[in-house]
Amino acid sequence: MESEQLELPIHEVHAERNGTRLEFLLNEASETHWLFRRDLSISLPLSAMSRRSIGGIPYLCPPVVLLYKAKNPRSKDQDDFEQTLPTLQPADRLWLAQALEVCHPGHAWLRSL
C-alpha cells in the first residue's frame, strides 16, 4: 500500500472496500479547541464536540453539523435543521446563532434561533 501525506486544504478522505464507502471528515483544531475551517474565529472546546446518545453512541455536536450545512443548504439540510431545532439547548442555539452571524449574516435560520 502506498504511503501518502495529507496536507491542507484536504478536509475529507474517502475509502472504499468491497463496495462499502467510508468518508472521514477532518477538522482544524488547536490543543484545546475545534476551529471552524471556514472562519477560524469560530471555535468550540474539543470537549464539547461530541455527545453521546442514551445508548452510549457518540455523535458530533449538532450545532457544528448545522453550521457546516448552513453554507448552501439543500432541502435535506433544511429538514435536518427543522428536526434538530427543537432538541437544541439554549446554549447550542446561541452558539449557532452567533456563528451564523459571523459567517452567514442574515441567514434564514437565524429567525428560528
Image (cartoon, rainbow, N blue to C red):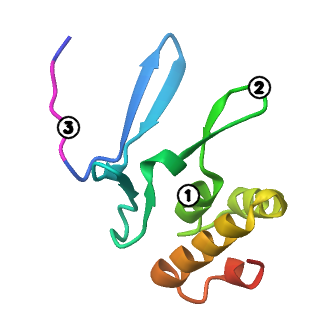
Q: Label 2: state its secondary structure.
A: loop
Marks 3 and 1, how far apart in space? Answer: 23 Å
For the point 78% across and 64% down, the residue is: 85
For the point 37% across and 43% down, the residue is: 26
Ranked by sequence position, the earlier of labels 2 and 1 is 2
Q: What residue type is labelled 1?
A: Val
10 vs 7, left or right, is right
Looking at the rendering, the stretch of residues picked out in magenta corresponds to: 3-7
Q: Do the residues labelled 2 and 1 touch (CB within 8 Å)?
A: no
Q: Label 3: state its secondary structure.
A: loop
- On the image, the x and y values in percent for residue 28 come to 32, 52
Q: What residue type is labelled 2?
A: Gly
Marks 3 and 2, how far apart in space? Answer: 34 Å
82 vs 72, left or right, is right
For the point 73% across and 56% down, the residue is: 76
Find residue 6 and name its label: 3
Asked if residue 6 lies in the magenta stretch, the reply is: yes
Q: Which of marks 2 and 1 is in front?
A: 2
For the point 58% across and 70% down, the residue is: 95
Q: Label 1: state its secondary structure.
A: helix
Marks 2 and 1, how far apart in space? Answer: 21 Å
Q: Is residue 3 above or below residue 110?
A: above
Could you tell me which quadrant the C terminus lies in?
bottom right
Badge 2 is on which residue?
55
Badge 1 is on which residue?
64
Chief SS of the magenta region: loop
